[in-house]
Structure formats: C-alpha cells, structure tokens
C-alpha cells in the first residue's frame, strides 16, 4: 500500500533503557514524555496522533551486549537473531518497538512484531523501516544556558527604594 507514518518519540533518559533484553513496557507520562505520529496515504486512519491517543509502548533490544547504539540508526544494528528490526514474527528475536492505541482513538496500533496497523489495526499495515535517534542541537543547550544566565542577572538587580 502507499501508506506512511512518521513520528517523533521523546523519552525520559532516566527511565528509558537502551539495554532492554526482554520486553520493556513504556507508559505515557512516565518513560514516554511525548509522542506524535502523522499517518498519510492509508485507506483509513490518516491524521495526526498525539501521546494521549496511546496506552503504552514496547521496547526490546535482543542484543548480546545488552544495548543498542542510540547515536546511530537502530534498524539494522546487530542483535542475537540478526539485524535489529528484521524479524516480523510474533516473537521478535532481533529487537522490537511497538505501540498500542487507546480504544476509540483511531490511532495506529500493533499488528505484529515491528508492524502497526492504521485505524486501530483495522486499516493498512505499516512496517518499521527506520528508527533514528535525533540529538538535541548544541544551539539548544547554548540558548538554554544563556536564558538561565539572563534570569539570574535579572533577579540579582537591586531595587532602588525612594
């Protein structure tokens, strides 16, 4: 089919482990800080979906070292059963990432290992083909530290009393 989904997932580094040797359940508002997904070209279930449209996520690495390199594309990295993201069986042996839609949300949901179905699984099937970490730009950190510095300067300014 011609359907596509593009998403952005934000995780809390303190609660998210890149070394999940078995299925790790990630919950919105805890390990998952934000999630948006846009589905287009599907026969049904197109649209923009937010974190509130999903109940939980699953993460699995299946690596011999216990973790993936989160600075590189994840699909294709070595795991115990082959490249990460290459096993589409019901029990992934190469690493897995899946999402579960909230009931009546119309959002995409799990349809198999590394597969999601649009329209809560009743629509077109989508296969995970790329999963890339996106680093926070250095300019963000520089801007943030400058803002903190400005805030401190403003707070320290003495107030003249007449």
Image: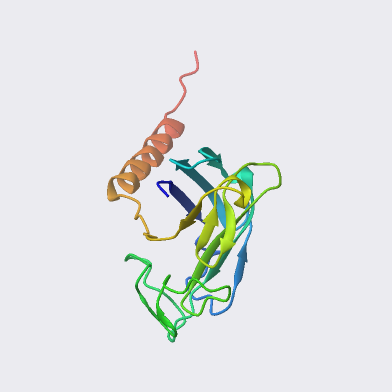
- Residue 159 % position (x, y): 47, 23
- Residue 102 % position (x, y): 68, 48
Is 140 left, or right, of 53 in this rendering?
left
In which quadrant of the rendered view does residue 149 lie? top left
In the image shown, does 111 or 139 lie closer to the viewer? 111
Is 37 left, or right, of 129 in this rendering?
right
At 43% from the left and 85% from the top, the residue drawn is 65
At 55% from the left and 61% from the top, the residue drawn is 98
- Residue 100 % position (x, y): 62, 55
Is 57 located above or below residue 150 in the figure?
below
In the image shown, does 112 or 48 lie closer to the viewer? 112
Q: Which residue of the protein is positioned furthest toward the right in this rendering?
A: 103
Which colouring convention does the figure follow? rainbow
At 41% from the left and 72% from the top, the residue drawn is 86
Q: Which residue of the protein is positioned furthest toward the top in this rendering?
A: 162
- Residue 52 % position (x, y): 63, 43
Is 100 left, or right, of 159 in this rendering?
right
Numbered disc total:
0
At 30% from the left and 46% from the top, the residue drawn is 142
In which quadrant of the rendered view does residue 31 lie? bottom right
Is 130 located above or below residue 86 in the figure?
above
């Amino acid at each position: 089919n011609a359907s596509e989904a593009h998403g952005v997932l934000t995780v809390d580094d303190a609660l998210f482990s890149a070394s999940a040797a078995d299925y790790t359940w990630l919950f919105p508002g805890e390990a998952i800080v934000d999630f948006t997904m846009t589905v287009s070209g599907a026969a049904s279930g197109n649209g923009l979906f937010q974190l509130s449209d999903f109940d939980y996520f699953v993460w699995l690495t299946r690596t011999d070292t216990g973790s993936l390199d989160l600075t590189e594309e994840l699909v294709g990295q070595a795991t115990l059963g082959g490249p990460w993201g290459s096993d589409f069986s019901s029990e992934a042996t190469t690493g897995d990432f899946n999402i579960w839609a909230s009931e009546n949300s119309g959002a995409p949901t799990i349809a198999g290992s590394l597969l999601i179905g649009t329209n809560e699984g009743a629509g077109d099937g989508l296969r995970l083909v790329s999963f890339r970490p996106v680093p926070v730009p250095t300019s963000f950190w520089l801007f943030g530290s400058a803002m903190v510095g400005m805030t401190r300067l403003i707070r320290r300014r003495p107030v003249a009393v007449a």
